[in-house]
Amino acid sequence: MIFDSHAHYNDSAYDTDRAQVLGSLPAAGIGLVMDVGANKASTVAAADLAQQYDFVYASAGFHPSDTEELERGEADIPWLKEAAERPKVLAIGEIGLDYYWPEPDRALQKKWFAAQLELAKELDMPIIVHSRDAAQDTFDMLKEAGGSSLSAVIHCFSYEKEMAARFLDLGYCLGIGGVVTYKNARKLKEVAEYIPLDRLLLETDCPYLTPTPFRGKRNSSLHLPLVLEEIGRLRNCSPREVEEATFENAKRFYRL
Ligand code: NI
């Protein structure tokens, strides 16, 4: 069975057919789905979806690009704590740093990443980290917040092998999805080959990052066999072996 460890079925891309898409997953071998919150509305929507579907779990958090909601006071850490204590909410995330976009400014992203890391520690919950063009600061902040005493996944891992080694040394997992099927994804293919199998989490980040040959279309967990096939090819093992390992890894990571 497949565990999609990072999906956004709460996204408006599924507004017209969400029940149909989610309803089709179990028969296609998708056993479990982590639906990830990224701001106030999606955190509520993810926990609501987890209430409706047995096989869906949720996370609660503010993506670095959405930290302005916290800055403006539309939500705060006590609000997030309550959201994280709803049934079937298993992790804090996605939280982190995104320097690809100039806004919000870095100091503000860091402030709210740190505050959400503190909440994860207080609640003793695993952490889903979003990190883009911010490897060193992400590493430093995770180290500062507790390093190997934290349980974290660097989702949609996009750095080179040397950086992977540093996160792996802290005991963290790396999330890999559709990008690994792209022809020009040389760095990620290297990481997928290099990472110990028990630290690999399979993810879609859907509706984004659809694997080849469907790149550009809306993604869903139904495309994950294409990702398993590519990881199996890179590692010289069967896709089934990757599927079974990543299912167990995600169950262990989310403490199911
Ligand atoms: Ni995401």
Image (cartoon, rainbow, N blue to C red):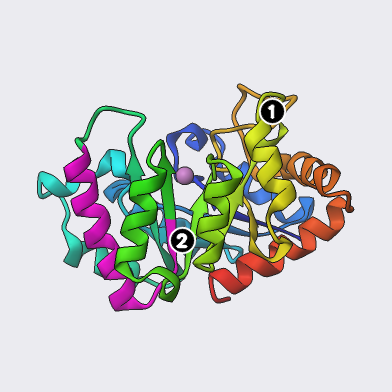
Whether residue 121 appears in this view of the structure is: yes
Q: Nearer the viewer, residue 10 or 5?
A: 5
Question: Mark 1 belongs to which amino acid?
Answer: Tyr
Q: Nearer the viewer, residue 60 or 111?
A: 111
The residue that mark 2 highlights is 58
Point 70% across, 39% down: residue: 189
Point 67% across, 24% down: residue: 184
Quadrant containing the N terminus is: bottom right
In the orientation shown, which residue stands out farthest toward the front?
162
Q: CA distance from mark 1 to mark 2?
A: 28 Å
Stretch in magenta: 106-128
Q: Is residue 238 above or below residue 18?
A: below
Numbered disc 2: secondary structure? strand
Q: Nearer the viewer, residue 144 or 32?
A: 144
The residue that mark 1 highlights is 182
- Residue 242, by quadrant, is bottom right
Taking the magenta stretch, the answer to whether it contains residue 142 is: no
- Residue 78, by quadrant, is bottom left
Q: In terms of secondary structure, what is the magenta stretch mainly?
A: helix
- 61 on left or right of 151: left
Disc 2 beta carbon < 8 A from ligand 1?
A: no
Can you give x and y, in whole percent of width and height, for residue 109 in the image? 23, 45
Numbered disc 1: secondary structure? loop
Whether residue 178 appears in this view of the structure is: no
Point 60% across, 46% down: residue: 161
Question: Mark 2 belongs to which amino acid?
Answer: Ala
Point 88% across, 53% down: residue: 237
User: Do the CB atoms of the residues marked 1 and 2 lie less than 8 Å apart?
Assistant: no
